Amino acid sequence: MPKTSLDKTDLAACRFLLRGGSKSFFAASLLLPPRIKNAATALYAFCRVADDLIDLGDDPKQAVLLLHGRLDAAYAGAPHDDPIDRAFAAVLADKKIPKTLPAALIEGLAWDSEGRRYNNFEALLDYAARVAGAVGVMMALVMGVRDRENLARAADLGVAMQLTNIARDVGEDARAGRFFLPLDWCAAAGLDVERFLEKPEFSATLGRIVKNLLDEAEILYARAESGIANLPIDCRVGIAAARRIYAAIGHDVAAQNFNSVGRRARVSTAEKIRLALHAAADAAWLTAGNLQPALPANLFLLEGAAEDALPDPRAFIKLLNLFERLERAQRASIAEASRTPA
């Protein structure tokens, strides 16, 4: 049986990794209750390792194969001899996270390694669903949320955060030969993508495209709010803080006239504290009941998350048939007994 309890030493290794490499998550996680924070830390640590393995390694294709092997081992209850893998495997088993979700993350990271570009916004959402929407859904499962409506809102939040990341990193990505903005938006605005990649410089045209992307992120941040309102009460402040901190990155890009080429947006520690305090004050007033349909890009995540949420209807039918056969046998036995002379 897979181990479901987190080892303290393994968890400490996860914390150490995130303290240096995922500062926004680390700040927000401090506001989560221990029962959630520990599992979330293990989850994010594996995501961080997966991202670094593909992004920073010499052979991305081999890294993808290695990650799938590590994932298979974790689900088999025999994780690789690594504190991050052991902690991640324990969370997968304890929180019953279907394999579809971390596999989707690895698929999105593989798209990164291919240098894939996205012809339109819908294609970009397909990418964001994998690298971030999947993480949002896994986090919701860690918190005990399994209903489709609120998982859809968790996926919205993950995608919104990824769109913010893309808007923030336009210059950094371009200097590394990467480009994520929708190509049809660029064509309509008159931005020559190849020329921009040869010499990454900010322009008003690029700024309008970045603004469009951040506008789409804001829509998803608003949609996500109702999902936060339906989280367990002790989880709301931490997730509301994460939402505010990531949205603030986009606000900082906007404050620089949407120029994310010459300067990378950031949120200071003091600002994170201020946003966390606002999140704590607002958590009690968040409104549930957003009935917006799930993003089409996120539907496969919701279906994957439902794999362990409900019993297989075929098994239920088999159980009913078994009861029916037992009942018939019992009636036949009673009838036979009534015909037998005493």
Image (cartoon, rainbow, N blue to C red):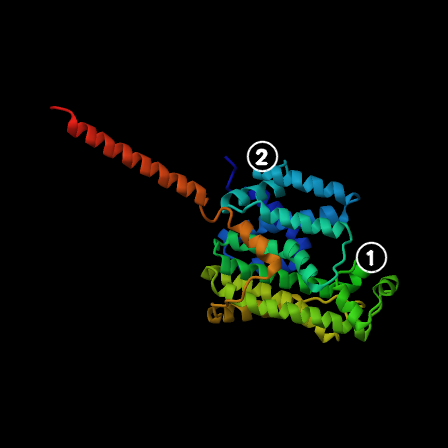
> Residue 155: image x %, image y %?
58, 59
Q: Amino acid at mark 2?
A: Ala
> In the current view of this chain or complex, which residue is farthest to the top?
341
- Quarter of the image where one finds residue 331: top left
**Closest to the observer: 79 or 27?**
79
**Closest to the observer: 241 or 93?**
93
Residue bearing the label numbered 2 = 78
Q: Is residue 100 visible?
A: yes
For label 1, count other residues whose C-alpha is less than 10 Å away and answer few (under 14), some (14-19) or many (20+): few
Q: Quadrant of the C terminus?
A: top left
SS category of the residue bearing label 2: loop
Q: Is residue 294 left or right of residue 215?
A: left
Q: Is residue 27 visible?
A: no
Residue bearing the label numbered 1 = 177
**Closest to the observer: 271 or 286?**
286
> Residue 29: image x %, image y %?
57, 57
Q: Residue at x 65, y 65 (%)?
A: 269
Q: Residue at x 56, y 61 (%)?
A: 294
Q: What mark, if any, has residue 86 been given in the picture?
A: none
SS category of the residue bearing label 1: loop
Q: Nearer the viewer, mark 2 or mark 1?
A: 1
**Closest to the observer: 295 or 105?**
295
> In the current view of this chain or complex, which residue is farthest to the front?
339
Q: Amino acid at mark 1?
A: Gly
Distance of label 2 from label 1 (alpha carbons): 38 Å
For label 2, count other residues whose C-alpha is less than 10 Å away and answer few (under 14), some (14-19) or many (20+): some
> Residue 339: image x %, image y %?
16, 27
